[in-house]
Amino acid sequence: MPAGVTGGHHPSPPGNRPLLAALAISQTIGYGALYYAFAVLLVPIATELHTSTTAVTGAFTASVLASAVLAVPVGRLLDRRGGRALMTFGSLLGTVLLVAWSQVDQLWQLYAVQIGIGAAGAASLYEAAFAVIIAWHQPQQRSSALLALTVVAGFASTIFLPLTGWLVDQHGWRSTLLILAAIHALTAPLHAIAVRSPPQQGPHAAVREGDSGVRATRAALADRGFWLLAAGFTAHTAAISAYTVLLIAALIAWGHPPAFAATIAGLLGVLSVAGRLITTGLQRRYRTTTITAVVFAIQAVAALLLPAAGADATTTIVAVVGFGLGFGVATIAKPVILAERYDTRRYATLAGILVAPMTLAKAGAPLAAAALHATTNSYTPVLAAIAGCCTVAAIAIAACSRPAERP
């Protein structure tokens, strides 16, 4: 095993329940206000700015791309300085930008605000929170801590989509954003108070590591398994992103009523939580890489089953459930696998390197899926491509079950 390619270089602290609770609340609010609210605000903003929903959606894509560009530098900052200052700054920036968003009256201003929100999210949302949790918990506690965080934050859409819709109906989209900004302002003190350096790490511990930290990162990047992880999780992200966007349209095209299609699509959020619970339970007996690879393979089969089901409701439900169980698995599997395989003092840097192509795939896959459908005039090739991505992901993650070899 290469130097630095291990998660056991130093003891982890025993955990911090107040920290976990604070992060669960901040992530729920952060994703609800900065991410999910956009879908509700899309049409009202397009109408008032006298532009198309496609043009407004492009601003959201710009936000996603901005977070991808910043993933690596943010990861390095997290490793060197910890999460407290960075996450607090990200929360403050997000609050300010929500206020600025409420005042836009031109399309370029919306794009500027969304790019800033992408930066705020990179500094304050999941990846930063995962880095803090990895640093604060022992290996045997990490899965349950990550599960607790993602289960609570998984309700962000359940809470904020209807809340944002009601606020828009009652007060209009500009006032809604000001109210969301007031709610989001709560995340900054949560991060400032709860996020601190773990006991075994002084405030300048990362700085004192010097060349050893650089060597640890280089050793991980020289590991073939790291790039297999990158390929696997990127392919899976592309599959999830494309599936989410096209599912309802595909079901309607195959003859299902719109209400049925929307209800089935709504199951994905619940199924993602169920998948995380199952994965965390199985981690007591099996390797995380093995569980993840099996789940991805099941998703590949489920994606191929969906077009074969046609208008048959029962088979369609089985196919969607099979795919939906893997929706949230990568979210908790990626940090656990990285922490098990590599030096946790460089977790955030390595996670940032993985997240960059994953975020690009998340932004680009729906466009590629739409282009493939337009070319073939069928959703079957699109589902076949999604199945192919899941198969690639399963093979790549399974190949990482072996420990890294010493050069």
Image (cartoon, helix red, strand yellow):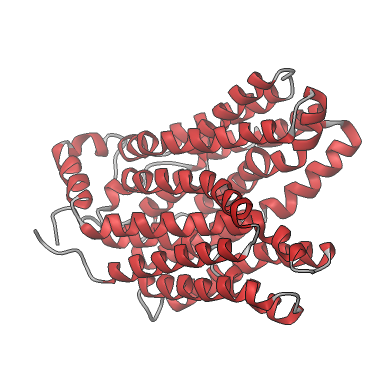
Q: Where is residue 188 shown, x and y percent of the image? A: 57, 34
Q: Is residue 289 above or below residue 14?
A: below
Relative depth, front residue between 327 and 251? 251
Locate residue 46: give its quadrant: top right
| The residue positioned farthest toward the front in the image shown | 376
> Which quadrant, please, contains the C terminus?
bottom left
Residue 56, quarter of the rendered image: top right
Residue 280, position as x, y percentages in the image: 48, 71
Relative to 316, residue 209 above or below:
above
Q: Residue at x 32, y 40 (%)?
A: 79
**Residue 333 rendering spot, x and y as whole percentages:** 43, 63
Q: Is residue 19 visible?
A: yes
Horizontal placement of 365 versus 160: left or right? left
In the displayed structure, would residue 16 be above or below residue 312?
Answer: above
Question: 71 or 133: nearer the eye?
Answer: 71
Q: Residue furthest right?
A: 170
The N terminus - image quarter:
bottom left
Compared to residue 80, the image places residue 161 above or below, namely below
**Residue 200 visible to the viewer:** no
State the image quarter where residue 340 is shown: bottom left
| Left-right relation of 126 to 293 | right
Whether residue 189 sits left or right of residue 53 in the image: it is: left
Identify the residue shown where x is 74% and y is 24%.
Answer: 102
Q: Residue at x 72, y 31 (%)?
A: 182
Give residue 14's position: percent from left, percent from top.
38, 59
